Image (cartoon, helix red, strand yellow):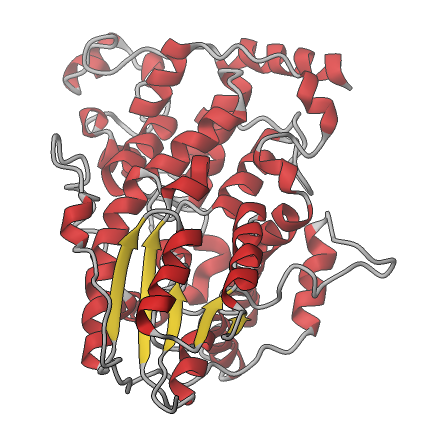
Amino acid sequence: MTDAPTLVWLREDLRLDDNPALRAAADRGQPVACLYVVDDEVAGTFALGGAQRWWLHHTLNTLRADIEKAGGVLILRRGDARVIVPAVADELGAHAVYWNRRYMAWQIEQDKALKETLSDGREVKSFNGRLLNEPWQIETKTGGPYKVYTPYWKQVQARDVRNPLAKVTKLSAPARVPESDNVEAWELLPTRPNWAKGFEPVWTPGEKGARQRWREWLKTQGPSTYNDSRNRPDLDDTSRMAPHIHFGEISIVTMYREMQDKIEAGEVPEEHGKVFLSELAWREFSYNLTYHFPQMFDEPLMQKFAKFEWDNDNDQFTAWTKGLTGYPIVDAGMRQLWHEGHMHNRVRMIVGSFLVKDLLIDWRKGMDWFWDTLVCADPAANTASWQWVAGCGADAAPFFRIFNPISQGEKFDPDGDYVKRHCPELAKLPKKYIHKPWEAPPFVLRDAGIELGKDYPRPIVDHGSKRKEALARYEAIK
């Protein structure tokens, strides 16, 4: 009985530092076995997309090495977690099963069912290893969830954030270890073709990579100019921490507290550091929304948008996904997404507005595309952000605020450096025409080596006329 092991079921918390479930298991002083399950059956439409699978392959390899270095063991299985977790617990003879909580409706249902199954003769505990504040902890004065971000953010700032827990550096493996899958056999990496080859120079999945990226960014000018530079895709001063946060390779508590420390020490100006903290809280606001309004995954939060008339032109949608719309800032963003599994946040808003309000294509199609192509695709953040862009979510940008892809490009990519980086066929265009190549005189296009319609597409829609059409359709549902 004294050496009965603890099973830690890892999910969105692939780290040893500030991991409440793993820390509690290690503190029991008994052997610990960690388990990760790829559960596509229960996840359904939220089964990991292609870009996330690439990331998962690499982060599981680093996690296994980290756990083994600490003296523990990582068991990998694939299938229905409702069957696998109890089976592994039985094989281990585990007397305790721990995990960190998740917040999507289907995840909560699965975890509740497993608690009932596992609790017969075992200690089963769950912890908050994912959020600063869980969705039920912040309510309005009259009770219930916030639908507006600003008062939610004020509540977040008024609450204390706990200290990060000590990293788990020492574990003991059980005497009898159940069989584990080999991550290579899962074939998570694309091969025919290897569309993820552009990911490798950009990303280092795993806890070590997360800490390294975070520390390096804190040393740059990014935090000290964040409120200004975060909207400039040409500068690329953002932290790029989203995929590391999504996979739980770094604790949100750690990031929040370390940025607070930088602000208090005067190393980061408060006006910029607090904007970064507010971005972390915006992610939590997304969890707050989808927890309280799970219908958001399928339906607009503002029900009047259920009657909105969409065109859903497949050819135009394909052009959008491939970065061939003829609007350079849109195309640069979509090509960055395909090449890196990432897109600058300002550009995400631009391409989202273009899909919904210029092409009049249902926001859910964009949400699904991002789910498959973003390495950081998060069900709460992806859903809430697309509803925000579409004007149908909580605290959303009004539908009538329609981004002009030309003026947005000129404002946030003034010299066209971002466009030139991702649309190299436009690299020789003068900056006067980089965001509107169709206005360039023939001799300018010739000197730049561009024949519109051949080397680079003409605009697939006219922004001005489509703006009027979008507003007319919005009036029809008001």
Asked if 289 appears above or below 477 in the picture, the reply is below
Residue 440 visible, this angle: yes
Q: Position of residue 200 (x, y in %)?
A: 16, 50
* Left or right position of 469 against 413: right
Q: Residue at x 49, y 36 (%)?
A: 349
- Residue 237 visible at all: no
Q: Position of residue 9 (x, y in %)?
A: 39, 65
Image quadrant occupied by the N terminus: bottom left
**Which residue is pictured at 49% across the width and 81% down the height?**
261
Relative to 285, is 37 on the left or the right? left
Left or right: where 176 falls relative to 356: left
Q: Is residue 38 above or below residue 91?
A: above
Give the x, y percent position of residue 472: 68, 11
In the rendered view, does 14 fall on the left or right side of 144? left
Against 151, residue 327 (above or below) is above
Residue 389's x, y, as percent?
A: 57, 34
Quarter location, residue 23? bottom left
Query: Which residue, as the protein is rendered here, is positioned at the far right?
Result: 142
Q: Out of 187 and 303, give the one closest to the viewer.
A: 187
Q: Which quadrant is the C terminus positioned in? A: top right
Nearest the eye: 240 or 234: 240
Quadrant of the rendered image containing residue 324: top left
Q: Count all numbered tags in the image, as a single digit.
A: 0
Of residue 53 and residue 196, the one placed in the foreground of this image is 53
